[in-house]
Image: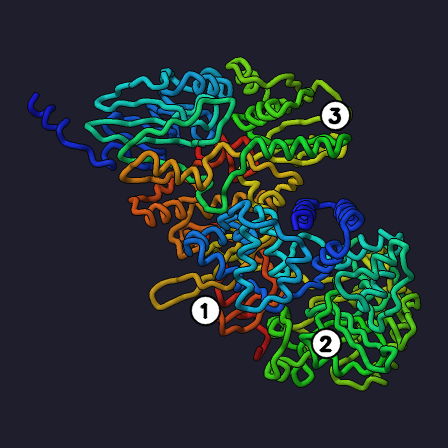
Amino acid sequence: MNRFAWLLDRLAYEPRRNAKLALIADYLRTTPDPDRGLALAAMTGGLVFRNAKAGLIRALIAERTDPVLFALSYDYVGDLSETVALMWPGQHGANDVPHLPDVAAGLRNAGKTELPRLVASWLDALDETGRWALLKLITGSLRIGVSARLAKTAAASLGGVPADEVEQVWHGLEPPYTALFDWLEGRATRPEADDPAPFRPVMLSHPIEDGDFEKLDPAAFSAEWKWDGIRVQAVSGTRPDGTRLTRLFSRTGEDIAGAFPDLVEALTQDGALDGELLVMREGAVQSFNTLQQRLNRKTVTVKMLDEYPAHIRVYDLLADGSDDIRALPLMERRARLETFLGRLGSDRFDLSATIPFANWGELAAARADPAVAGAAADAEAVEGCMIKRRDSPYLPGRPKGYWWKWKREARLVDCVLMYAQRGHGKRSSFYSDFTFGVWRTTPDSDELVPVGKAYFGFTDEELVELDRYVRKNTQNRFGPVREVTHTIESGLVFEVAFEGLQRSTRHKSGLAMRFPRISRIRWDKPPREADRIEALEQLLPAGG
Amino acid sequence: MTLARQRSDQIWRPSQLLIPTPAGLYCPPAEIYIDPVRPVARALITHGHSDHARAGHGAVLATRETLAIMALRYGEGFTGERQEAVLGAVTRIGEVDFRFVPAGHVLGSAQIVVESRGLRIVVSGDYKRERDPTCAGFEPVACDVFITEATFGLPVFRHPPAHLEVAKLLESVRLFPERTHIVGAYSLGKAQRVMALIREAGYERPIYTHGAMDALTAFYIAEGAVLGDIRKVASTDRKSLGGEIVICPPSAIQDLWARKFPDPVTSFASGWMRIRARARQKGVELPLIISDHADWDDLQATIREVRAGEIWVTHGEADALVHWCGTVGLKARPLHLVGYGDEGEAESTGEAASAVAG
């Protein structure tokens, strides 16, 4: 366990991808089975323990610490595992430091009643780093800047094979992946289990700059709407025994099929589709807020399937039947995609429409007004255009010269900072989550009404200044929330950029912003000059 | 005579002897401020960090070392008049006795014992309890009111022994003999303490330093700190310093300056390094948890040791410490003093925070 903890610790502080790869490869090379395989499983999301949950950890720490001190500490650190690891009253030498295989077996096999005692005994024996690693393992989110893909790439380097080869055999393997290491280290042949539904690394685009257009010939490109959903890869294949295997991957290769049985059962043809996950009701694309009801869930209820029907707007075909067609030009793949979708005949999947244009000016006009240019009622879910070379192959990563994204201009509004809270992750311990408001007229006077919350858009230097500003201008404390001075005369104005606006019953203002961020800090602007609620209400979609 | 006698028989309420003001802690009967953040007529200064020791006061009373440090940083004209406080000796101002007692924070750092009419308040300034080869150790003074900092006033802050952190650094130097180890450390105190600890661990190669810490390091050496062969980086070619240890101000670890060394390992010696996100925010690969402030356990131990009836918390994570005092039956309150924590174990990356609120 100590060596595994050491690896996670080093990875967490190492910013460079190549150095991360070297660290993981070195660990895998020098650590025996089954430890290394379990570590690989932990980094690829392959270790899931049903009974071990964050709630268990909260209960254990609650028995051992003052609740107020715990709450203040968690608020400061911004990470449950780390807070508990640091606060745990250590008892070195109390027990033997556990080994990773024993921990994995214990977490998998122990019942709900014996698990707390078992986990506590391990926490007693470990040091801060060991406790942190153990808790990361239990909560299942390592957050050490290592994707499943990166870990597999490191494993592949043991055998000098490309990561895609590991990807091909991956889903036929189980932790601790002894067969994989035997193959990579030359002791056995490649594992048989060729995956009928493998993940293929996705192709990404570059943001387009104004100067780029002069160099690009519009005739060589095709354009589509950029939908405000989640990029997914839906893959279906037939196993040797004739049964169907369908997976739904996120863009980083995590399998999220478990939460989308509605899509899985609708994909009844062998192939690999690249598209945007959306929620659609009566043929209309719903807002990202609505889609969020279906995201980040391991399972899903019948009610949710009914209320939030999932849909994929497909823009590419990577495999047609068992043929990998990624090397074909985009327009040929698209023609095959149309045939594929016709054959599939499911209303869960539809083709992403192209935007007709003869020159960049016409595309700019379409982007400025998607409703008129073909997106019709779905225009609110459009966040810009995708521009793709008609002859582009499908390449992994972000190759130059093929695909661009051209986002819609953000909307801007001047708001006044009202409340601040400490952030999580990168911004932990700084006051960096800001609630801001705009003016509204009441019978007595004008008052600020909160319209949103943002926690990025500023530089690290600005974060330090904002944190100091919050500390110096605190009027009230409500638990972890600080109320910051916000009167007509005195306060801080943010220029807030956002992508779209929805009506919402969850917010006092009746509005919810999509993707709000601080675009500028207006140290110079008096709060009285910030915007009014009417300015925002004008931006609401009609009847929305 | 009768009146004077009557008055001195009357015991002060603590808030009559010391009150928090926007300029700092004020003592009305002596008309002095302690560690004022704005220019005042008469100031008593606990130590030389720029958030506590600011230039421009009419008169300053501080230890000899602190006065010297202020002169090094701000020039000889940093104050109108200066008076040296001898450790342990009493200086009477009006009817108040002031006594400076070692705080263990940095060279010259002192607590100030404020005593009048039978009431004793200890202003501890910034302090730590861990051994530091470069300054005198903290001496607990029993008192009625103990005024403490709470920079690391959360139970997640438990500093490991500093020599183990230095061992981590030396182990990394051994592992990566071709890479320069750039250690960010505050120019006053931390840098020299880290140098001394590296020497205690038996490391004998030259230690290289950033030009910004020359004057203070020379002062420490003149005051008897055993730092060995210290060399300025500017005089050598940065490219040739692979495998060496370089100590620089925290603000320099992310500078272009640091990038000119061969494949640098970025390190930072600070109590904040206990929190992973803090290390990552600064791009630190090798965090060293070495602090010149008391950690959570030492704050508690000190508060118990001085047996004060009342605890006032100046700056840092006051809420948690005040809450803890309540759970063990001690009366405590936060003062919410503004302007501290900008140097030393600073909130910000900058060292040049001396102008803040100045």
Q: Which residue is mark 3?
A: B241
Q: Is the residue marked by circle 3 packed among few (<14), some (14-19), or many (20+) residues within 10 Å?
A: many
Q: Residues within 10 Å of mark 1 (few under 14, many from 20)?
A: few
Q: Position of residue A250 (x, y in %)?
A: 73, 67
Q: Secondary structure at mark 2?
A: helix
- Which of the image's four quarters has the C terminus of chain A? bottom right
The residue carrying mark 1 is A508
From the viewer's perspective, is residue A434 above or below residue B49? Answer: below
> How far apart are labels 2 and 3 at the CA level?
61 Å
Whether residue A151 is visible, yes or no, is yes
Q: Which residue occupies 73% across, 69% down?
A: A255
Q: Position of residue A155 (x, y in %)?
A: 81, 54
Which of A388 and B349 lies nearest the eye of the viewer?
A: B349
Question: Same subunit under labels 2 and 3?
Answer: no
The amino acid pointed to by label 3 is Leu
- What amino acid type should be assigned to the residue bearing mark 2? Ala
Q: Secondary structure under badge 3? A: loop
Q: Position of residue A305 (x, y in %)?
A: 64, 82
Residue, disc 2? A375
Chain that bears disc 3: B
